[in-house]
Image: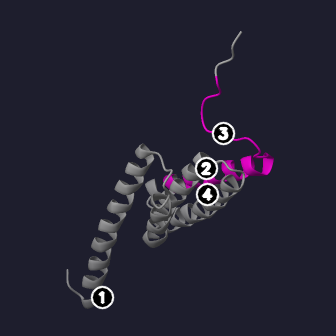
């Protein structure tokens, strides 16, 4: 009998500590979403920032193991978490880092391009609103 090839993203060489960090970041993301839904933006941002830091470490660990696809997933998730924490600059930097890779699959490249483009537009709007608030214009 022939076994079908394994599906999904390769996790070879990642241990229990990695899995524990993945579970923790997933829990932080869920907590952040719940807190945001409960109108607790500061607490939500704190959870998303912690999750983003973990995602970056997970991405680096995967890259060190040669698991580039899994590294990309964690890097993109880190960018999303930073954006939800309100750190557009870091989110855009991570998106740009992914886009600089020549081996990024086309579908993921398109998602990252759209995401970073939307973040740049929102950052412009946010900065303009802050400037208006600083000078007292509604």
Mark 4 vs mark 1, foreground winner is 4
In the image, is 87 to the left or to the right of 129? right
Q: What element carries label 3?
A: loop
Q: Which is more toward the observer, 70 or 36?
A: 70
Q: Residue at x 54, y 65 (%)?
A: 43
Q: Where is residue 132 in the image (x, y as percent from the top left)?
A: 24, 83
Residue 35 magenta: no
Q: Residues within 10 Å of mark 4 (few under 14, many from 20)?
A: many
Residues packed near mark 1 inside 10 Å, few (<14), some (14 to 19) or many (20 plus): few
Mark 1–mark 2 Cα distance, whole angstroms, equals 44 Å
- How far across and down, in percent of the image, does residue 1 sit? 71, 9
Q: Mark 4 or mark 3: which is in front?
A: 3
Residue located beneath label 3 in the image = 10
Q: Where is residue 6 in the image (x, y as percent from the top left)?
A: 65, 27
What residue is shown with label 1?
Answer: 134
Q: Is residue 30 visible?
A: no
Which quadrant of the figure contains the C terminus? Answer: bottom left
Q: Mark 4 points at which residue?
A: 55
Q: Do the residues labelled 2 and 3 touch (CB within 8 Å)?
A: no
Tell which circle, 2 or 3, labels the residue nearer the N-terminal end. Answer: 3
Q: What element carries label 2?
A: helix
Q: Which of marks 3 and 4 precedes in the sequence?
A: 3
* Residue range highlighted in magenta: 5-33
């Amino acid at each position: 009998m022939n076994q079908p090839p394994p599906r999904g993203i390769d996790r070879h060489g990642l241990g229990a500590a990695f899995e524990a960090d993945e579970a923790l970041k997933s829990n932080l993301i869920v907590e952040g979403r719940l807190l945001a839904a409960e109108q607790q933006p500061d607490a939500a941002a704190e959870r998303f920032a912690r999750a983003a830091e973990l995602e970056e470490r997970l991405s680096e660990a995967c890259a060190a193991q040669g698991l580039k696809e899994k590294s990309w997933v964690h890097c993109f998730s880190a960018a999303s978490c930073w954006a939800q924490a309100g750190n557009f600059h870091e989110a855009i930097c991570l998106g740009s880092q992914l886009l600089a890779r020549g081996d990024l699959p086309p579908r993921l490249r398109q998602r990252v391009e759209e995401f970073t483009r939307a973040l740049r537009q929102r950052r412009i709007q946010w900065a303009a609103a802050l400037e208006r608030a600083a000078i007292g214009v509604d």
